[in-house]
Structures are given as C-alpha cells and as structure tokens.
Amino acid sequence: MRLTIMRLTIVVPCYNEEAVVELFDHRVRDSLGRLDGVEYELCYVDDGSSDSTLDRLRALRLRHSRNTRYLSFSRNFGKEAAMLAGLREATGDAVVFMDADLQHPPELIARMLDLHALGHDQVVARRSRDRDGVARSTFSPFYHRLVNRLVAVELARQGAY
C-alpha cells in the first residue's frame, strides 16, 4: 500500500532492559527489513538504567551506525520524559513508540504504517485483554467512560476497533 519512500523513526524508551534490548533490536530490524519503501532509524533512550543497558545500546550503535542512535539520561526521569526526548530527536516522517520488553510486537508496525498511509494521523495499538482477570474486566468499562469524559481524544473500549 505504501507507494513513496517513507522515513520512520522508532523511539524506544529503555530502563534496565539489558536482558531484552538486543532481542528487541533483532526483531524490529527483521520486521522493518520486510517492508518496501520504508527507511528507518531506531532511537533508543536510556532512562538512567542501573544495569548494562547503556553498554548494549552503545554496541548496537556501533553495529548499526547507519540507522541507530541513542540518548542517555543522567538518572531515571520516567518513560514519558524518555518518549519526549526521543520524539524531539526523531527525523522520520512518522514516529512509532515501542517498549523494549516486546510487549508491543514489532510485526504490527507494517499494519500501523498501512493505516497511516490511509490518512490516519495517529495509529495506536491496543493490547489484547483475553487474559485479564475478573476485576479488571469488570471495572475497565467504567475507567474508559471516566477518561473519555476528561480527555479530548477518545479511548477505544475493550473489544472496539
């Protein structure tokens, strides 16, 4: 569906992700390598990790210097600050935020880009609720109603697409 070359930035906030960041990087590159017409960069943001996450990011940068960058915070400022810093550094036509722990399957990027190409300004992936417990399933509709009254962008309810 994508006809022109698009430049995509994947922003990845990282906090103590030494155990998964290399697997994440491999899976994302594998998924993005299958897409036609997409050039990409990975922008990792180390959010003051106390493990060897930063060392692993440096190694990824050396291995993939053409399309990998990282930022490093002096201490933990939180995921939102890391996302904002990555967004400010992004050079892509579109930005995808992903967690390094693979909670967001990289294989969804292609579908998200297809929806973006159809004219959607924002495409938000939503996790499956199949394994939610009774309490969460019961109170989730109330939470969504409350939030939708307070914010300008409507949150999709469970089961809604």
Image (tube, rainbow, N blue to C red):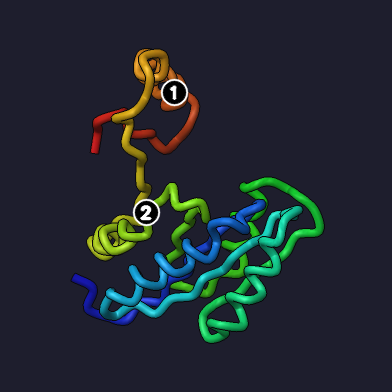
Q: Residue furthest bottom?
A: 66
Q: Position of residue 66 (x, y in %)?
A: 53, 86
Q: Position of residue 5 (x, y in %)?
A: 32, 81
Q: Amino acid at mark 2?
A: Pro
| Label 2: few (<14), some (14–19) or many (≥20) C-alpha neighbours in 10 Å | some
What SS does tag 2 mark? loop
- Disc on the earlier residue, 1 or 2: 2
Of the residues tagged 1 and 2, which is closer to the observer?
2
Query: On the image, which quarter does residue 160 sit in?
Result: top left
Quadrant location of the C terminus?
Answer: top left
Q: Which residue is mark 1?
A: 149
Determine the residue positioned at 23% across, 73% down.
Answer: 2
What SS does tag 1 mark? helix
Q: Amino acid at mark 1?
A: Arg
Q: Which residue is mark 2?
A: 105
Q: Is residue 79 above or below residue 116?
A: above
| Label 1: few (<14), some (14–19) or many (≥20) C-alpha neighbours in 10 Å | few
Quadrant location of the N terminus?
Answer: bottom left
Q: Position of residue 34 (x, y in %)?
A: 28, 75
Q: Is residue 11 left or right of residue 45?
A: left
